Image: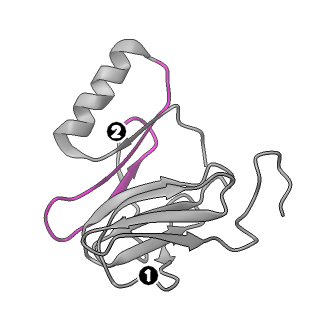
Amino acid sequence: MPHYPYLIVGAGMTADAAVRGIRELDAQGAIGVIGTEADPPYTVRKSVDGGTTWHNASNGLPDVPANALAADPYLPGKIWLGTDVGIFVSEDAGATWAPFNDGLPNVAIFDLKVSKPGSSLLACTHGRGAFTLALSRSDAIFADGFDG
C-alpha cells in the first residue's frame, strides 16, 4: 500500500474541501481519501489520486454504514473498518474485506485505534463501551521489523 502523507476519512463536499485546502499548502503531496455513501446502497469508496477518481472498495462488506477506519502502521495494506455491525479487516489495502469481531458483540463501531507496537486493536462502540481485541502473533510486527 502506498504511503499517503495526507489521509482523509470521509467523502462528499467535506472531503473535496479538505483536498482543496491541502492542495493550497502542498501541491505535490499524495492524498488518500476513503469515504462511504450517506444513503443505501452503502459502499466504501477509495481514491489514490486525491479524489480525482473513486473506486469501489466494498468487496466482502455488508450493506451498512462504515464509521471508523484504522490502518496498521506496521503492516502496509492492513486496514480495519468499523461498521454498524462490527469490525471488518482488509489485508490488501481495501480490495477485499472479512469479518474481524473476535468476541465483540454485534454493535456499531465508531472509533478504532491500533496500539503500539501493533499487538491490539481498540474499538469504541455505540452504547456498549470500549473493547481491546488482541491481534494474532502474525500481526504483531514491532517497529524495528522483528516480530515477537
Q: At 60% across and 43% down in the image, what residue appears?
A: 2
Quadrant of the image occupied by residue 125: bottom left
Question: Image height check: is 77 above or below 28?
Answer: below
Gap between marks 1 and 2, in whole Å?
A: 33 Å
Give the dominant element type of the magenta stretch: helix, strand or loop: loop
Relative to 31, residue 91 above or below: below
Question: What x and y, as percent, mark residue 49?
Answer: 43, 37
- Residue 51 numbered mark, or none: 2
> How far across and how far down the image is residue 37, in percent?
21, 59
**Who is closer to the viewer here, 130 or 135?**
130
Going by the picture, which residue comes out furthest to the front?
129
Q: Which of 59 and 102 is in front in this view?
A: 102
Rendered residue at 43%/77% (across/down): 60
SS assignment at label 1 = loop
Could you tell me if residue 119 is visible in this image? yes
What's the image's color scheme? one colour
Segment tinted magenta in the rendering: 28-52
Is tag 1's residue or tag 2's residue first in the polypeptide sequence?
Answer: 2
Amino acid under disc 2: Gly
Residue 96 in view: no
Q: Return the residue at label 1.
A: 104
Secondary structure at badge 2 equals: loop
User: Can you give x and y, in whole percent of width and height, for residue 96 in the image?
Assistant: 50, 70
